[in-house]
Amino acid sequence: MPSNRFPALPQRMLLRENLVVALDTLRARKVRSALTVLGIVIGVTSVISVAAIIEGLNGYIKGRIMSMGSHMVVVTRIPFGAAFGRLPEKIRLRKYLQYSDAAYLREAVSTVAYATTFGNRVTLSGDVNEIRYGNEHVERFFLRGVEPDYARAIPLFSVANGRFISSYDLEHSRSVIVIGAGISDSLFPHTDPIGKMTRLNGKPYEVIGVFEKDPGLFGGMGVDQFACIPLTNFHKNHPEIRDLFIAVAILPEADVGQAINDISQAMRRRRRVAPNAENDFDIGDPSFFTALWDQLTGAMVLLTGVISSIGLLVGGIGVMNIMLISVTERTQEIGIRKAMGARKADIRAQFLFEAVTLSGVGGAIGILAGGVVALLVRSLMPTIPAAVSLFWVAMGVGISVSVGLFFGYYPANRAANMDPIACLRYE
């Protein structure tokens, strides 16, 4: 008995036929298709662009943290992050760090390469720093009192021109200053700053060095906005500033975790902390900043996920809607195909393929738009090195295809289960 079915087409030809039909459907209903994919475009664009920004920032931030010294920790009286809020009384009453604590750590902990004390006079506390040369002046920068080992403990503060503060400067409390490149460019736009006499907060200081250019994180406070003077001179001129910090560089071959524990035990002995009492000091290491950054990016990813999900949901509902309309408009076509031998699976595959093509076009546009956004961000704000990775491109493709499959299955299944006789009678 002869079969009433057409010979089965090769899989490649079937896919190509379904693709041609799907594209013809999109072309025939341009406006409706464009409005349908808009939600998917918004969702995928937000995922790709934010992921690109975070991807670039992750490498930049971690590189920035490592430039401070991967084996560097800072001992403070007040925990990092707590200085900007209302401090509990037990923290406010902590003893201040002493100028001699750094020397004690160098002697007490064998894994310490450098330990150096420094103090800050910053604009956040209401003290406005000012440095003048001739008619030029700079305000609102970080003034830091340091020791000679400071630049060794924190490599980010490397000198590009001139020299850093020496032991002689420290011992004699000399009025010398090393300035950031941003301060130097403002005070000495056409002159070599080395050897020039400036007035820092009304007092004369000789410029002995300029730091390597470093605009800072996102163009914020970097080394360019720092000025360093000998710690003894800093203490003499600003005795009211009592909060000190200790930068500790750990030997490269030492275990950082064990070294931090040794530093903690040494500080407890130094400050006579009772065996069962909490530390009355804090130790910050690069992992703290990495963890803080991961928390911030985690919140950004969550927010982006919510926004993109809304867009994808709207787009998915649009795909389902347009496919249901398409099924209704092509009822007779479905009947004819079934009468000629098309199986339920063939009809279902055709409409699923159309739904996936529709969402896939939205995904492709979204990926391109996300790439353009990342490129614009990188061009307009070089400090935010947005970078689109292949992983997130693949994720964009996967998301758009998944939306097409999920929201296109019901219309496709409805078309597959239609009665061919009822379809042929439909007008």
Image: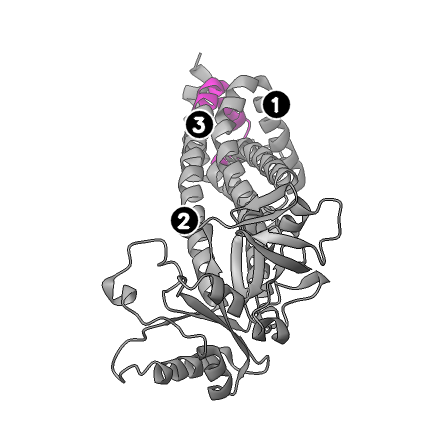
Q: Taking 180 as reference, is 361 above or below it?
A: above
Determine whether, in the image, residue 227 is placed left or right of residue 95: right
Q: Crowding near pointer 3: few (<14 within 10 Å), some, many (20+)?
A: many
Residue span colored magenta: 324-348
Closer to the observer: label 1 or label 2? 2
Q: Are marks 1 and 2 in contact (CB under 8 Å)?
A: no
> Horizontal and vertical percent for residue 85?
32, 53
- Identified at 47% across, 30% down, the residue is 39
The mark that comes first in sequence, 1 or 3, is 1
Residue matched to label 3: 318
Mark 3 → mark 2, Cα distance in angstroms: 56 Å
Q: Residue 170: in sight, yes or no?
A: yes
Quarter of the N terminus within the rendering: top right
- Identified at 42% across, 81% down, the residue is 261
What amino acid is at disc 3? Answer: Gly
Residue matched to label 1: 24
Q: Taking 171 as reference, is 318 above or below it?
A: above
> Horizontal and vertical percent for residue 306?
40, 41
Q: What SS does tag 3 mark?
A: helix
- Identified at 52% across, 70% down, the residue is 232
Q: Is residue 337 magenta?
A: yes
Q: Which residue is nearer to you in this view: 314 or 373? A: 373
- Identified at 45% across, 36% down, the residue is 312
Residue matched to label 2: 126
Q: Are marks 1 and 3 in contact (CB under 8 Å)?
A: no
